[in-house]
Image (spheres, grey):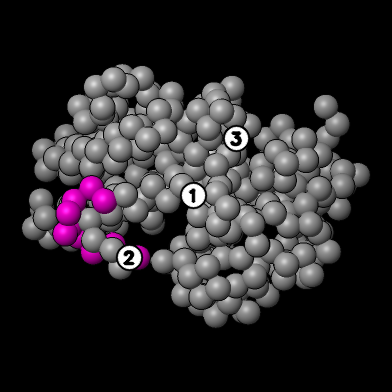
């Protein structure tokens, strides 16, 4: 296979990560900066362009110097693959921004943009535990909850580019207020924010998701209750997805997927409890095999490497 390289960019609600990625899944020159330091999009775009240019300069002095950059892949919340725009992401107050075309103009490189969960799913299909699996759902559990769907080997986007918003399945009527303005959505129960809200209810005080994970490892009974409650909410949400999509695999990724070493098994238990009887036990739950820190960047670059392979 001829060596190829792309720039992968993951725009998260907290951090933006980017790196050079080769077509065999190796990352070079990885770097990051705080997304929230640039609430004004023009200033954010200027910083992102600066970081990309520094990455291109790094490449010139590396072993990839003679390998052309195929393009830039960008994963972001509320991104629309059809038009290259990010549209009013819940955790970023930018409104609608045409980031793909602006980045192309700033860098001279072709840019592919997609929802961050879709890019993660493409990365999982190329490099992760879903390699060779035709029907699976990638579920990202971070600041929010996103889903990327592969059906019969094809990433599902829809005409309007918004397919796969599994984080906004209702799991509790008139439940917690989601960041999108709706109530009872899976996102507000299975995200890091959701974990902390559950912890507040169980502990009676503020406890971070990271602290819950640390307490769980020490055998704390209340932390175990938080972990299992979160797993139950997620299993319930996945049971709805399973009834509609009948995937053979759910891949969970993001910080919450690491809250306990057996979290995927706990989610599997609750999925099987709630699943439609005819498909019960058909969908496996696995934790992503890609690095939690770099997997999102790998997936973003896969948007270019996948489409041009």
For mark 3, does the 10 Å Cα neighbourhood hold few (<14), some (14 to 19), or many (20 or more) residues? Answer: few
Residue farthest along the front direction in this orientation: 159
Residue at the image position 46 percent from the left and 47 percent from the top? 164
First-in-chain label (3 vs 1)? 3
Question: Are the residues tagged 2 and 1 within 8 Å (C-beta)?
Answer: no
Q: CA distance from mark 2 to mark 1?
A: 19 Å
> Is 92 situated above or below 160?
below
For mark 1, does the 10 Å Cα neighbourhood hold few (<14), some (14 to 19), or many (20 or more) residues? Answer: some
* Residue 123 percent coordinates (x, y): 60, 38
> Is 107 situated above or below 236?
below
Q: Which residue is mark 3?
A: 154
Q: Main secondary structure of the magenta part?
A: loop
Residue at the image position 26 percent from the left and 51 percent from the top? 170
Where does the magenta region start and end?
A: 170-180
Label number found at residue 179? 2
In the image, taking residue 98 as reference, residue 208 lies left or right, namely left
Query: Can residue 167 be seen?
Result: yes
| The C terminus, quarter of image | top right
First-in-chain label (2 vs 3)? 3
Question: Are the residues tagged 3 and 1 within 8 Å (C-beta)?
Answer: no
The kind of secondary structure element at disc 2 is loop
Residue at the image position 60 percent from the left and 72 percent from the top? 97
| Magenta span contains residue 176 | yes
Mark 2 or 1: the one toward you:
1
* Residue 6 percent coordinates (x, y): 75, 47
Residue at the image position 42 percent from the left and 51 percent from the top? 165
Q: Which residue is mark 1?
A: 163
Q: CA distance from mark 2 to mark 3?
A: 30 Å
| Magenta span contains residue 105 | no
First-in-chain label (2 vs 1)? 1
Residue farthest along the right direction in this orientation: 66
Query: Can residue 10 be seen?
Result: no
């Amino acid at each position: 296979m001829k060596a190829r390289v792309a720039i992968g960019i993951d725009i998260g609600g907290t951090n933006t990560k980017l790196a050079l990625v080769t077509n065999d899944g190796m990352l070079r020159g990885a770097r990051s900066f705080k997304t929230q330091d640039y609430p004004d999009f023009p200033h954010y775009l200027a910083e992102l362009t600066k970081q990309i240019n520094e990455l291109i300069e790094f490449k010139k002095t590396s072993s990839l110097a003679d390998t052309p950059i195929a393009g830039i892949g960008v994963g972001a919340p509320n991104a629309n693959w059809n038009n290259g725009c990010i549209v009013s992401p819940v955790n970023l107050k930018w409104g609608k921004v045409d980031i793909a075309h602006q980045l192309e103009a700033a860098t001279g490189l072709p840019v592919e943009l997609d929802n961050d969960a879709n890019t993660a799913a493409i990365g999982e299909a190329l490099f992760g535990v879903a390699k060779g699996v035709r029907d699976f759902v990638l579920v990202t559990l971070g600041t929010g909850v996103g889903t990327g769907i592969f059906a019969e080997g094809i990433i599902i986007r829809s005409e309007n580019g918004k397919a796969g918003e599994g984080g906004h399945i209702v799991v509790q009527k008139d439940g917690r207020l989601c960041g999108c303005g709706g109530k009872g959505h899976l996102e507000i129960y299975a995200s890091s924010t959701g974990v902390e809200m559950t912890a507040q209810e169980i502990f009676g005080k503020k406890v971070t998701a990271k602290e819950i994970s640390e307490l769980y490892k020490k055998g704390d009974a209340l932390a175990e209750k938080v972990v299992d409650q979160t797993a139950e909410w997620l299993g319930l949400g996945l049971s709805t997805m399973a009834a509609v999509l009948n995937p053979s695999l759910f891949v969970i990724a993001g910080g919450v997927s690491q809250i306990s070493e057996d979290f995927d098994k706990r989610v599997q238990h609750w999925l099987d409890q709630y699943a439609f009887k005819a498909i019960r036990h058909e969908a496996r739950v696995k934790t992503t095999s890609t690095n939690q820190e770099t997997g999102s960047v790998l997936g973003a670059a896969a948007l270019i490497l996948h489409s041009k392979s």
